Image (spheres, rainbow, N blue to C red):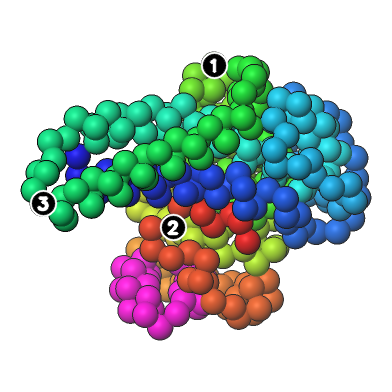
Amino acid sequence: MQLRYILIALFGLAALIGAYFLGRGRSPEAPAAAASIATARGPQTGTNAASIDPVRMMASLPSRDVPLKRIFNDLRSRADAGDVAAATRLYQDLRTCAGLDNLEWFLTRVADETLADKIDGTSAQALERYRVQLEAVESHKQAIQKTRALCDGLDRGMLDSQLSSLQRAAQLGEAHARACYLASGPGYDARGLMRHPEWIQEYRSSVKSMVDAGMAAGDWKVVDILRRSYEPGADGMLAGTLGSDAVQYYRYLKLYRLGAERGRAADMDRKLALAAARIQPEQRADADRWAQEKFQNEFSSSNSTDSTAPGWDPCSFATSQE
């Protein structure tokens, strides 16, 4: 059994347990103002959903050791009423629980392969490496048991609310949820999508308002997601929703380039030159003006690459515990 497999399990569990223990008690920043909305039973449709101002609730979140089944209805009701902290807690916990079986199965395989390894008993280095692997497996088993307590008793209906919970947090202005929902769409819960094909149209109906909200908030994650989705040959649900548009690609690429740190500027400049060759000079001039205005007004001339390092994952918990 190679050590790298143990490390893979370690990183996966670190993300899972980190989401469970470290971040869920914090209330994320969100726009102030209040508005109540009707209880949602699935992903909410319409282009106005993302413009609803969230309520900054004063009630604290339930403690971290309370099973999600016991607090699911409370979190859902609070999220529906505009509580961004409850909405964030709910979508992250559901994501944790939905991925737990797969991670536990993977760890079981790692443990079996580790125990089946033939170890050179005469090599102190081999014995030490084997000891470290066994300790890692045991530590991860204990961590999974703690997380299992969070997820025990959840039914399929609760797990099928993954997407609607993510969407609700995104509508309330939670930046990580917004980036994840835009980037993944209904593919965030592919199993659920097979039972709910209507989610595709609901996603298409909500994209514009999500994009507008992200731009108004100066969210570089949204800009990066858009420029990648408009890129020639781009794949994915957002690319399919937006369609091909050379001018829009140049616009968002130019905006992203204006905020790029020096180490990434050269690559952006090469892409900009290629993108500029695909549009008319007057279109480029108009796009340049648009990008400069957005950069100064909505994005306050900030750094575009701090939160969008190469290979960043819009749906990773690793970036959502700020």
Q: Position of residue 99 (x, y in %)?
A: 49, 32
The quarter of the image holding the C terminus is: bottom right
Task: Tell me the kind of residue under disc 3.
Answer: Ser
**Residue in view at x 27 percent, y 28 percent:** 112
Q: Is residue 96 left or right of residue 101?
A: right
- Magenta span: 252-276
Secondary structure of the residue carrying numbered label 3: loop
Q: Which SS does the magenta portion mostly show? A: helix
Label 1: how many Cα within 10 Å (few below 14, some 14–19, many 20+): few
Q: Pointer 1: what residue?
A: 195
Task: Tell me the kind of residue under disc 2.
Answer: Trp
Q: Position of residue 269 (x, y in %)?
A: 35, 76
Q: Is residue 118 magenta?
A: no
- Compare marks 2 and 1 and give the one earlier in the sequence: 1
Mark drawn on residue 312: 2
**Residue in view at x 76 percent, y 54 percent:** 27
Please name which of the two marks, 3 or 1, marks the residue nearer to the observer.
3
Mark drawn on residue 285: none
Secondary structure of the residue carrying numbered label 1: helix
Q: Pointer 3: what residue?
A: 123
- Compare marks 3 and 1 and give the one earlier in the sequence: 3
Q: Is residue 271 magenta?
A: yes
Q: Is residue 247 above or below residue 300?
A: above
Secondary structure of the residue carrying numbered label 2: loop
Q: Is residue 304 above or below residue 278?
A: below
Toward the bottom, the furthest residue is 262
The reply to whether the C-beta atoms of the residues labelled 2 and 3 are less than 8 Å apart is: no
Task: Tell me the kind of residue under disc 1.
Answer: Arg
